[in-house]
Each structure stands twice: as C-alpha cells, then as structure tokens.
Amino acid sequence: MEDLEEEENGAEEVLGSSLTMEKVAAAKKFIENHYRAQMKNIQERKERRWVLERKLASSDVPNEERINLIKDLERKETEYMRLKRHKICVNDFELLTIIGRGAFGEVRLCREKKSGNIYAMKKLKKSEMLRRGQVEHVRAERNLLAEVASHCIVKLYYSFQDAEYLYLIMEYLPGGDVMTLLMREDTLSENVARFYIAQSVLAIESIHKHNYIHRDIKPDNLLLDKNGHMKLSDFGLCKPLDCIALSTLHENQTIDDETLAEPMDVDDADNRSSWRSPREQLQHWQMNRRKLAFSTVGTPDYIAPEVLLKKGYGMECDWWSLGAIMYEMLVGYPPFYSDDPITTCRKIVHWRNHLRFPDDAQLTLEAKDLIYRLLCDVDHRLGTRGAIEIKAHPWFKGVDWDKLYEMEAAFKPQVNGELDTQNFMKFDEVDPPTAARTGSGSSRKMLTTKDLSFVGYTYKNFDAVKEGLRQSFGM
C-alpha cells in the first residue's frame, strides 16, 4: 500500500514538474520575444533619426528648422510608443448589431468609446479554435491583415484577446457583400461584372505579392464600401505560400478521394437538376445559398480541382475561384452547382465534362474565353505567371487599372448612415452583448508555448504616425 502511495506521489511530482517546466519555457519565450522586439524598435528609431539627420545635412534647410524637424520626429516617435503601450480590450468598445456568424464566433458592429469610430469586431472563441486546430489559420489571418497595406483588402485596426476570445477590430464596409448583391440582382451586366472582377484581381494580386494564398475566394468574402468599391475580406483560410498543406479547405467536410476521382456520367451527374430551366436553376441556387452562407461547412462551388484532389497547389487556386465567381455574376449561379456538395466536388474535379454555358446566356466571346482560361488545368490557367496575364486579357480592354479605386463604382449600395446594416443578413442575439471581459494579459494562460506569439497588439491606430514620418521626412 505504501509503495502504491509512493508511486502516486512520484507521478504527481513528475506531472507537476512537467507543468512547471512548460510554464517556465513559456515565460522564457515571452520575455525573449518582448526584449527582442524592444531592441528592434530602439534600433529602428535610431536609424530613422540617422536618415533624417543625413538628409537635413545635405539640404539647404536653415539650422533652426532642422532642430524643429528633429524635435517633431522625436514627438511622433514618443506618440508612436505611447500608442503601442496602450492595451486595447473589449471594454474600449460599445457592442452593437451582429452582422455575421460562423463556426468559431461572430462579427459585430461596434463603436470605439474614446474616438466614436465605427468598426467591425470579429470575435473568435479560442477553445473552439484550439479544439479544431485552427490557431495557425487565425494567426495567418492576423499577420496578413497587419502586413498587407492595400486599399483592396479590409483594414485591420487592432487585435487583442482575453481569456475566452480573440478579437480582430476591422474596417466596417456597410455596402454588404457580393453574395447579397448577386441575390438581389440575379445577374450583373458585363460592365458591372468587369468592374468588380478587375477590383478582385487587384485584391488577390496584393496578397499574392506578399506570398499568401487566400484559398477561400467567394462572393461572401468580397465586401462593398459605402461608395460601392470592393475589398477582399475573411483571411481565415489564408496560408503563406511556403506553408501550404496538402489538405482540403473545409476540415469539417470529409470527401473520399476515390469518390472524387470516380468517373461520372454527364447525364447521371445532373439527374436531379438537368430538368431545370436556367431560371429554375437560379432560384434553386439562391434558396440553398442562404443556408450555405452561414453554415459551418460552407459551399465548395469555388474550390479549385487541384485543392480537392490534394495534389498540392499554389496561388493559381485563387484564380480558379475568381473564374467561378465571374461565371456566377454573368449566368446567375456557379458553373458546377448541384444539389449536394459531394456532387459539386465531383463535377469540379471532372470539369472538362461539366463546364458549359446555358443556351440563353448572352455573354460576349471575350467573357466566355476568360472564364474558360480561368476554369482549366493549372498548366494552362491564366495567372500562373502573375496577375499581369489576366489584366492583359481582351475582356479587360479599356480598364484603367491604376485608377479603379478612384473612379465611380459600377454599383452604389444604399447606405443610410454609418450604423446602417441593411445590406447584411439579420441575426438574433444568442448571448446579450457584454463588455465585462478583461484585457489581453490573462489570455496567455489559454495558449501553449508555441502560441504565445499571438498576443494583443494595435496596428492601424498609429499608422498615421508612421505615415507622417514617411511623408514628412521622405522615409
């Protein structure tokens, strides 16, 4: 009996020792990261002052003005550091209407109490993300939004966490998404479709330049601002190019490889939908689309065949998705739509047998050609050698790529004020809004050692300071 108690005590000591060592390793990593970042900031600050002093020394600026410019730099640097030290938490925001809900949380309209600015708050439940192994995806999303400064993608202003949730505070675009636009309009004219496909090309190009693949390009993730200009959002499935895994996108949806690769008889594949007229097909798609938009499984209609077949894939998979969206804009429903997702996936894999246009589709030859050159095998797909291939296609003739975001948008959504959510789906409150959570510090207890780098930071709220440094002193 005594031996058994000794063994149990020994096991408890080993377990306690293991937990202690884990905590020590986590604390060590946090401290090292903290001081490494501090040293980097100090070095960068010294370099900015050195560059300014060199430029002033070689210019004809009077000595008094030089002193004032250096003081101005120091003032901006101090403001920059003050903003970085401020720990943002959910208590800093007034929580308003829910405008989106997904597998890991929700997106809610919110107002920053101090400034009064309106944002979209993406709130993700950490325990659910850890359980489903999605921490790396969220980190990739946060990193991409922080790294890519482009007017083509939704801006990230803050990121922080508490014991239960991760929060991303992002730009609010009140015009709704392209999915809602398509459901209202049925189809778009080629001129309107050309405008939004062109802006999508710029958005996808901007993340590809940073070696990220979006992997989830679909109408739901193309948002419109109040003026009708489109921005790309929802980077929860994005991956750095060197970290692409040979897996399907929707982890909740398991599809057997043999089922996908099995040959399909064209008539049997459409046995439930071939009798429908194009109008009935459109109505059936729209009815099911609302259900799929907010389900945890989603829709596979925009996924490239090489992704479904787990053959390994690159940036080209995003251009396939764009081709499927273009088809939907002009025809009214995706090119491989079927009543169930498995059949859709099989039709995508066997796209040569199923890519066709309805007889009554009034598309120009250039539009059809571009779709055919996006919805094809990787070796022949436009975009494999960069977005310049797509921009050069005849369908985009006359597009001024450098001024797309300066010109009037092809469609202007109805927006009545900054709090208007009429262009989004309505959601019931499951849990009433609450702001009784703590700041970012305690959240570290929820993460493993390797996840400690995902801690709260602020981004765009001091972008004005950084931009001021660049513009004022030519940096």
Image (cartoon, rainbow, N blue to C red):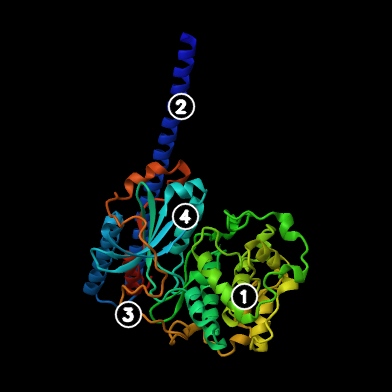
Q: Earlier in the sequence, mark 1 or mark 2?
A: 2
The amino acid beneath tag 2 is: Leu
Measured Cα–Cα span from mark 1 to mark 2? 54 Å
> In the image, which is nearer the foreground, mark 1 or mark 2?
1
Residue placed at 58% from the left, 57% from the top? 250
The amino acid beneath tag 1 is: Gly
Can residue 40 be seen in this snapshot? Answer: no
Asked whether the residues under the numbered discs 1 and 2 touch, taking CB atoms below 8 Å apart as contact, a structural biologist would say no
Q: Earlier in the sequence, mark 3 or mark 1?
A: 1
Asked whether the residues under the numbered discs 4 and 3 touch, taking CB atoms below 8 Å apart as contact, a structural biologist would say no
The amino acid beneath tag 4 is: Arg
Numbered label attached to residue 416: 3
In the depicted structure, whether residue 471 falls above or below residue 305 = below
Classify mark 3: helix, strand or loop.
loop
The residue that disc 4 covers is 139
Measured Cα–Cα span from mark 2 to mark 3? 59 Å
Classify mark 2: helix, strand or loop.
helix
Q: Quadrant of residue 107?
A: bottom left
Coordinates of residue 359 in the picture (x, y in percent) = 69, 85
The residue that disc 1 covers is 323
Asked whether the residues under the numbered discs 2 and 3 touch, taking CB atoms below 8 Å apart as contact, a structural biologist would say no
Measured Cα–Cα span from mark 4 to mark 3? 34 Å
The residue that disc 2 covers is 15
Asked whether the residues under the numbered discs 3 and 1 touch, taking CB atoms below 8 Å apart as contact, a structural biologist would say no
In-front residue for pair 327/466: 327
User: How many circles with numbers are drawn on the protein?
Assistant: 4
Report the residue that reaches farthest toward the top. Answer: 2
> In the image, which is nearer the foreground, mark 2 or mark 3?
3
Numbered label attached to residue 180: none
